[in-house]
Each structure stands twice: as structure tokens, then as C-alpha cells.
Amino acid sequence: MNEKPLSSSIRLATPADIPALVKMINAAFAIEEFLEGTRTDAAHLAAAMKQGQILLIENPQGQLLASVYSEQRGDRGYLGMLAVSPGAQGSGLARRLVEAVEDRFRRAGLAAIEISVLSLRPELLPIYRRFGFVETAIEPFLYPRTFKDGDTGAACHCIVMTKSI
């Protein structure tokens, strides 16, 4: 496990952060070798910033360490694309970001927060359970990325997890 980076700060991402975000997010999601292409690109992140917010953590030198997308959806919050730079994984940064998003949603008067986990990433379920999320629904996989080797992804679905805040 890596040590927690000292003096790292959380802030809202700006359009100027997009190039570094694309690089870090794609490195963090490189494990998803079953999907074609990269996890995100500049256009996707720019659109996401118009729909919701991206929080990030950087060290005092300005190096991006982690990020998460959040969006208010009616009376619930949504958390997605949680990414930690491969060199900083296991250092508690994901938990810090999740807690920051929860705090923002709580102050906005929301009662719950949801995430969606690909069924092909079962190793993520225990992590989110430790953060207080529980499985609440199954939804079809609708992300625009396709599966490698011509697989239609029929065996893949999304596991919705919810946490009361």
C-alpha cells in the first residue's frame, strides 16, 4: 500500500485540468482491458464538466493524484469515474474524494448517493461496501465503449450501489 501523499488538496477541476485528467483517468482505468479504447477523452470530460462537477486531488507541486465525477440527479447524487493515479492507489485518496462528494451532496440537501459498477469489475464491490454503499439494483451496460474481440457485452451489466447520506 502506498503512503498518503502529504499536503494534498481537493479542488474543483477546471477546463485547464482536462489534459492532465485525461491522462490520469486513462492510466487508472487501463485495467479495463476487456473494453476497446480509452476510458475518456477531452470532449467527454468537457461535456461532463457542463453536466456535473469533477473534484480532484493534487499534491503541492500540482501533480494530479485522483479525481471523481459527481452530479445531482433529482433528489440523489451520482458519483462516477473515480480514478486514482496508479502510483497513488491504496493511499486513501479515493475515500477522501468520496467523502468530499458526500459532504457536498449532504449540504445540498440530498439524502442518498449512487454509483454504478461494471459487473466485470467485481473487485470494486468490496471497496465501495467499505465506503458504506450497498447493492440496490442491476442495470444494463449502456456505455458507448465496445468490447474487444467482437463480444457484444451481453454478459456485462451495471451494479447500482447506494449510500444514504
Image: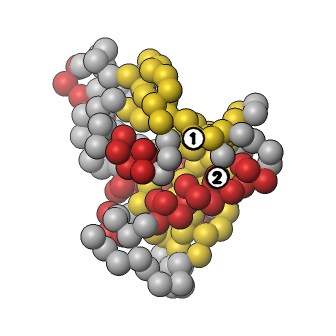
Report the side of 136 relative to 39 (left or right).
Answer: right
Q: Nearer the viewer, residue 15 or 130?
A: 130
Instruction: Where is residue 20? Give x, y as percent.
Output: 49, 64
Q: Is residue 66 visible?
A: no
Quarter of the picture holding the N terminus: bottom left
Instruction: Give the number of callouts.
Output: 2
Q: Which is more foreground, mark 1 or mark 2?
A: 1
- Give the quarter of the image for residue 100: bottom right
For the point 47% across and 84% down, the residue is 6
| Residue 102 numbered mark, or none | 2
Q: Nearer the viewer, residue 144 or 116?
A: 116
Q: How is the image coloured?
A: secondary structure
- Give the quarter of the image for residue 48: top right
Q: Residues within 10 Å of mark 1 (few under 14, many from 20)?
A: many
Amino acid marked by disc 1: Lys
| Residue 163 numbered mark, or none | 1
Q: SS class of the residue under badge 2?
A: helix
Report the side of 10 relative to 139 (left or right).
Answer: right
Report the side of 122 relative to 7 (left or right).
Answer: left
Q: Is residue 64 visible?
A: yes
Image: 162 above or below 154: below
Image: 7 above or below 101: below
Q: CA distance from mark 1 to mark 2?
A: 9 Å
Amino acid marked by disc 2: Glu
For the point 36% across and 40% down, the residue is 125
Instruction: Where is residue 18? Give x, y as percent.
Output: 56, 58
First along the sequence among labels 1 and 2 = 2
For the point 36% across and 55% down, the residue is 28
Image: 58 above or below 122: below
| Residue 151 numbered mark, or none | none
Q: Check if mark 1's residue and mark 2's residue have beta carbons within 8 Å.
A: yes
Q: SS class of the residue under badge 1?
A: strand
